[in-house]
Image (cartoon, rainbow, N blue to C red):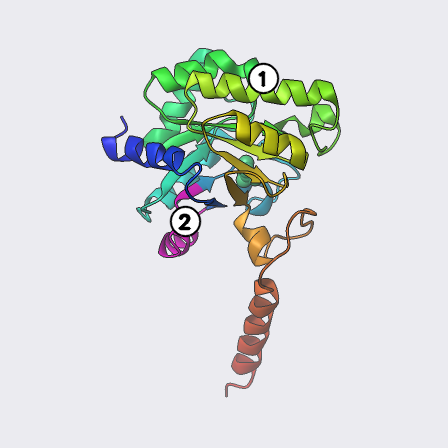
Amino acid sequence: MLGTMSLEKAAAIRAMKGRESIPVLTAYDFAMARLLDECGIPLLLVGDSLGMVVLGYPDTTHVTMDEMEHHVRAVARAKPAGLIVADLPYKSYETVEQAVTNAKGLVSAGAEAVKAEGGRDILPQVQAIISSGIPFCGHLGMLPQHVLEEGGYHVKGKTETEREALLADAKALEEAGAFGIVLELVTAPVAEEISKSITIPTIGIGSGKHCDGYVLVTTDLWGTTPGFIPKHVRPKFEIAERMRLAVAEWKMEIRQRP
Ligand code: KIV
């Protein structure tokens, strides 16, 4: 059962709309959560992107509930001041019963809110999660859990049909009581239109500069994601290079030991 503190944190994120831009980053373990907390990040997302950047899967469709719970527990041990939101993984919210059971599982592991991908197609699940007292964050646009059926990661909102569908999905999630919506790879004009037409914050990723908040996969920001870095990311620090240098330096040091 969630305490009032968690509900207040979700309400505080919602109330940030129109007042300040919301910075959101992904956290996958204790050390990352501590560091992001020290930086005052108000929402830590235990995203199923961890499947790709931590566990080495080719996409997020391989991530299990057990894996999500394991990482949520690690993040929760850092006791961050920001809201811990956890992704419901692939096929963990196919029915209303499954969605509520798994959302509760993530909450038992330490999550304070959950996120799932979809709009009107998962509305009964969203309504049931919210009715069970768990704050919910939507996710629209390019949905990584659909990568296999869609044959890749495609920008959404380019056609009038897609624009209308995104707007209707965003409205439906707002009416269901979601406290925010991630917009991933939505065209900038459509992301702006959605942001202006709903009262809950949009959290953009690769969706232009007119969202209410922005989210990044933290390892993309740091430049430590192995392999592919998406187009919308400009890593701030070459931390990976510094890590390699630290290892090389240490290797030299121990070689020189008698
Ligand atoms: O899994 C994740 O990290 C996400 C963000 C990219 C929004 O859903």
Residue at position x 64%, y 36% in the image = 59
Residue at position x 43%, y 24% in the image = 178
Could you tell me if residue 251 is visible in this image?
Answer: yes
Q: Is residue 235 magenta?
A: no
Viewer-closest of 134 and 106: 134
Residue topped by disc 2: 41
Q: Quadrant of residue 108?
A: top left
* Amino acid at dot 1: Ala
The vertical placement of 117 against 95, above or below, is below
Q: Is residue 158 left or right of residue 141?
A: right
> Which SS class for mark 1?
helix
Q: Residues within 10 Å of mark 2 (few under 14, many from 20)?
A: some
* Amino acid at dot 2: Ile
In the image, the segment drawn in magenta is: 28-44
> Which SS class for mark 2?
loop
Residue topped by disc 1: 168
Badge number at residue 28:
none
The vertical placement of 107 against 245, above or below, is above
Q: Position of residue 38 (x, y in %)?
A: 36, 56
Badges 1 and 2: C-beta atoms under 8 Å apart? no
The vertical placement of 109 against 239, above or below, is above
